[in-house]
Image (cartoon, grey):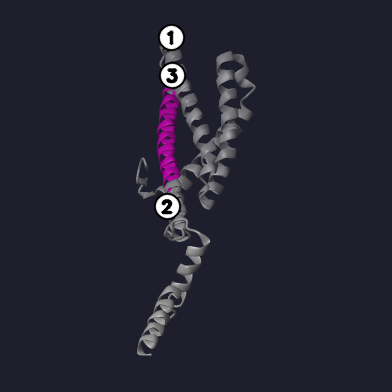
Amino acid sequence: MALIKRCCFLSVRRGSYLSAFYTLVFYTMIFMAGTINIHSMQNDFYVFVIGLCLMIMSALTIITSIIMILGITGENVSLLLPWIATIFILTILEGIITVFMITRSVSTKSIDPFMICMVTVDLIICSANIYGLLCVISLFFEIRKKRNSQSHDETRLYKRPNQMEIPCKDNEEISKEYLLTSSPQRLPVCSQTEEDNKSSTSFLSMK
């Protein structure tokens, strides 16, 4: 059950590659920026906690993006799951950051152009992450459906034809039936005996 058929005018597979490279490059930049500015965040506790969480999730996203590229190349659905889980949590974190910045701007009653720009960027990032999630999840279902169909075809290919059930009989009856079916020209023993009796009877009557 694919959620979407195409991703940014591309196939779901290429769209997933694009999502992986996007998260790899973008969150590498976020991680490097957070590493450089980590000391300036220590003045505000909430900003420091959010920035630290964002750095940790960015590092996990870098790792899972590389893993997902390998998973797409090898069509291994299990390697797509870490990226899906990481981006899902990271998108929630981005939403929390956006709400936090809006709440702080409202509480201070100050409209900061830089804050407005950051909120806009966060909303764009959240939208891109959600669209990437839809694309990768669609690829996940597509690969799993392909694997299931291949395994079903292999099962049908190597499945033995149904054999006729033979009722259990005595060994003597089975041996008789085998003799009758294996050599059609052979007459049954009982029929040969009857013909011999008839010939002997006719010979005696002639006498």
Amino acid type, mark 1: Ser
Report if residue 55 lies within the magenta region.
Answer: no
CB atoms at circles 1 and 2 under 8 Å apart? no
Residue at 44% of width from left, 53% of height from top?
152
Residue type, label 3: Val
What is the C-alpha distance between the residues marked 3 and 1? 12 Å
Measure the C-alpha gap from mark 2 to mark 3. 45 Å
Question: Where is residue 170 drawn, in percent x and y?
Answer: 50, 59
Earlier sequence position, callout 3 versus callout 1: 3
* Farthest bottom residue in view: 207
Tell me which numbered mark, 1 or 2, is placed earlier along the sequence.
1
- Report crowding for label 1: few under 14, some 14 to 19, many 20 or more residues within 10 A (C-alpha): few
User: Which span of residues is magenta-colored?
Assistant: 114-142
Residue 124 x %, y %: 41, 32
The relative height of residue 52 versus residue 182 in the rendered view (above or below) is: above
Against 94, is 155 above or below? below
Q: Nearer the viewer, residue 199 or 192?
A: 199
Q: What amino acid is found at the position of numbered circle 2 in the picture?
A: Ser
Residue 14 can be seen in this image: no
Residue at image mark 3: 99
Residue at the image point whose x is 41% and y is 34% from the top: 130
Name the residue beneath numbered marker 2. 149
Q: Which mark is residue 107?
A: 1
Per the model, the C-alpha gap separating discs 1 and 2 is 57 Å
